[in-house]
Image: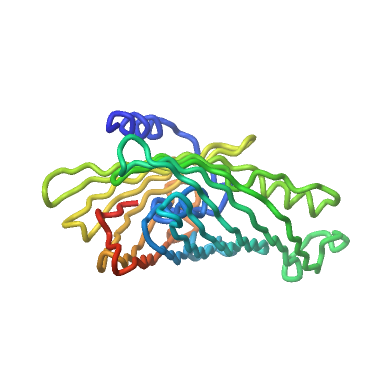
Amino acid sequence: MKKFFIILIVLCCTSSLQAQQDEQLSLYMYNKLYFNPAYAGSRDAISAVVSGRFQWVDFKGAPTTQWFSLHTPLIQKSLGLGTHLVNDRIGNRSRTSAYLDLSGSIPLDDASQRLSLGLSGGIDVVGYDFSAVNVVDPSDPYFGQTQSITKPNVGAGIYYYGDKHYISFSVPRILRPKVTSSFDSIVSTLNAQHYFLAGGYVFDLNSVFKLQPSTLIKFTPGAPITIDANISLLMYDVLWTGVMYRFNESVGINIIYNIKKTLSMGYVYDFPINGLRTYQNGSHEIFLRYDITPKNRPFTSPRYF
């Protein structure tokens, strides 16, 4: 098993492709419900995550994104139920998404390892505000207009996990919106299918330190691949410190503090290494996770993912 994860991470690190198609997320390993509904219920607790990203500080019209997710196991972990909300804005474009997530899982040869399948369904509300945009051609049909459109969509994913490892593959949006106007064409491009492949493993170095490498690959047909790699060191099961690399785009540092077994908070700062580095001062991302467990069902082992 360890060899498989090492090979997966090495393959990711040998690629040299880039791009941002969907909302960017550096702490993806702590907010997987955003891109994979099969993650619902996998933490043995009612788990809530609030996260925010402020990208390309001091760059006019830079992306800002907020996430919220909530999920819980049902029927002795065989089912999981959750929801996730996303609010994203870049320039004069905004997208607000609300999805319900449902998963079903089965134990494998080891009771600590499970295979989960998930489905999600919800809506994306996409809007454009052209009222404050400077245009060269005032006769442009969108000049001075504010438009929005609501489109339903569904997603699916598969999630294999244990106490110290996971592999995830998902398609958060499967449907392509029907194009009946030029505005629909813009929304259809924005809601293109994205394929997410992620994996991570926790290695025990000794009784004090653990090492967690992880990676996330995003692929959209007709667009370059985005690959994130992260490696973090855990000390005393309390403090994660690590570095991240988004290929040909940015590098960064992260810190996660487990205040107690049920409460964690984290921060990431990443700085561009591409042509944008002279126009902005990096990106900030924060997150807070809280797990609620019944008094008669405490955590039986650390939940690293």
Q: Residue at x 45, y 45 (%)?
A: 105
Q: Residue at x 54, y 61 (%)?
A: 83
Q: Is residue 13 visible?
A: yes
How many numbered circles does the render carry? 0
Q: Residue at x 45, y 52 (%)?
A: 32
Task: Give the quarter of the image for residue 299.
Answer: bottom left
Q: Give x and y (percent) for residue 190.
A: 67, 50
> Compared to 150, does 191 lie above or below?
above
Q: Give x and y (percent) for residue 15.
A: 43, 31
Q: Give x and y (percent) for residue 170.
A: 53, 42
Is residue 90 or residue 161 the one in the foreground? 161
> Compared to 147, does 108 lie above or below?
above
Q: Give x and y (percent) for residue 194.
A: 59, 42
The colour scheme used here is rainbow
> Compared to 128, does 215 lie above or below?
above
Q: Is residue 227 visible?
A: no
- Look at the image and tell me in which quarter the N terminus lies: top left
> Compared to 69, does 177 lie above or below?
above
Task: Give the quarter of the image for residue 16.
Answer: top left
Task: Give the quarter of the image for residue 291.
Answer: bottom left
Q: Residue at x 63, y 42 (%)?
A: 193
Q: In the picture provided, is 153 more to the left or to the right than 79?
A: right
* Furthest-left residue in this view: 207
Is residue 254 or residue 71 the one in the foreground? 71
